[in-house]
Image (cartoon, rainbow, N blue to C red):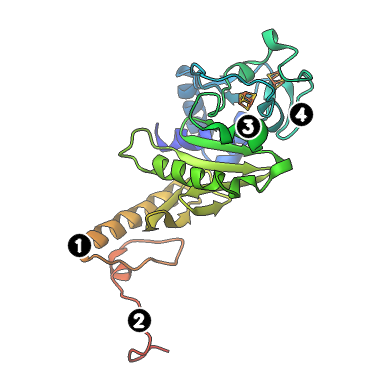
Amino acid sequence: MDQVTLVVVRAVESGATTTKGIIGATGLSRLKVERALGTLEKQKLLFRESRGSWALGIPVRPTVRQCGSCTLCCKVLEVTDLGKPLNTVCNHIQAGGGCEIYSERPRQCRSFSCAWLQGHLDDDWFPETAGMVAHFGLDSLNVQVDLAAAERWREEPYFSKLCELSLKGLRVSEGHPYATLVMVGNDKYLLLGRTIVPDPTLFGTAFVPITHDSFRYWKATSLEHLQRLNDRVIEIQRIRQEFGYCAIPDDDDPYPPYRPSLLQQPEQPGAAGAP
Ligand code: SF4
Ligand code: SF4
């Protein structure tokens, strides 16, 4: 999937469900947005709801578990076709679990299946008790947290598992890469191992590892900015390979050439000229 299409997917996931809204959220031209929407629709990854808004529609995989009494996704997720916002209990939930309009429920509900239901997570993650719904998107693992348990994702055993899943998603050598995103009301966090990136942008985040599970990151404000950030990250990796050390830059908006400043060693305390 190309960068423009990825940005459009992230915009839809972030709540921009009309073409105009996607253009406004991304700053991309109408032509680019419409082309990306057309591609995604052709691949059956995106569809128009009866209210005319765009919704992601990833095919449901066979499930190995049953929802039972859980109805958390019917509370925490948005259902555009019903006009149901995030974190609002759906009017169609039946007492004791289930959907009272099951045979006529919107396509968005039909195509949804959480990661616990699909067998990707152990029983600690049963959504009703965990207080969060984890589900895989096109290029992301999304964790929608119930506002009644807003800090739960930072607690154990959840945070360590999220860290593990995040590291797995970042390792391109381990199959399909994905980003791990946590949504708590209007707050959104990207996880890079144990590093929490608040308010990630639609354009992506460049990052380099500092330890095996923590990272230094820079948030991109446009596709062109992401390209420059990623070019500098590639240079950092090259210098680390060549010299075993590279300065980690502080500035957020780099321009080439990157190598001279990256090769600067930090001043040693007590060295001549150091404060
Ligand atoms: S959150 Fe998962 S287990 Fe709970 S109702 Fe939705 S799909 Fe079923
Ligand atoms: S329509 Fe049914 S399946 Fe969809 S959110 Fe409401 S209760 Fe859940």
Is residue 141 shown left or right of residue 271? right
Residue neighbourhood size for the residue with mark 1, other residues' Cα within 10 Å, grouped as few (<14), some (14–19), many (≥20): few
Q: CA distance from mark 4 to mark 3?
A: 15 Å
Name the element at disc 2: loop
Residue type at mark 3 is Pro
Mark 2 and mark 1 lie on one chain; the one further toward the N terminus is 1
Residue found farthest to the left? 242
Q: Which residue is mark 2?
A: 267
The residue sitting at 58% across, 43% down in the picture is: 182
* Residue 187 at x, y percent in the picture: 65, 47
Name the element at disc 3: helix
Q: CA distance from mark 4 to mark 1?
A: 56 Å
Q: State if disc 2 and disc 3 touch (CB < 8 Å).
A: no
Q: Give the vertical position of 231 relative to 251 (above or below).
A: above
Q: CA distance from mark 3 to mark 2?
A: 50 Å
* Residue 139 at x, y percent in the picture: 46, 34
Quadrant for ligand 2?
top right
Q: Which residue is mark 4?
A: 89
Mark 4 and mark 2 lie on one chain; the one further toward the N terminus is 4
Residue neighbourhood size for the residue with mark 3, other residues' Cα within 10 Å, grouped as few (<14), some (14–19), many (≥20): many
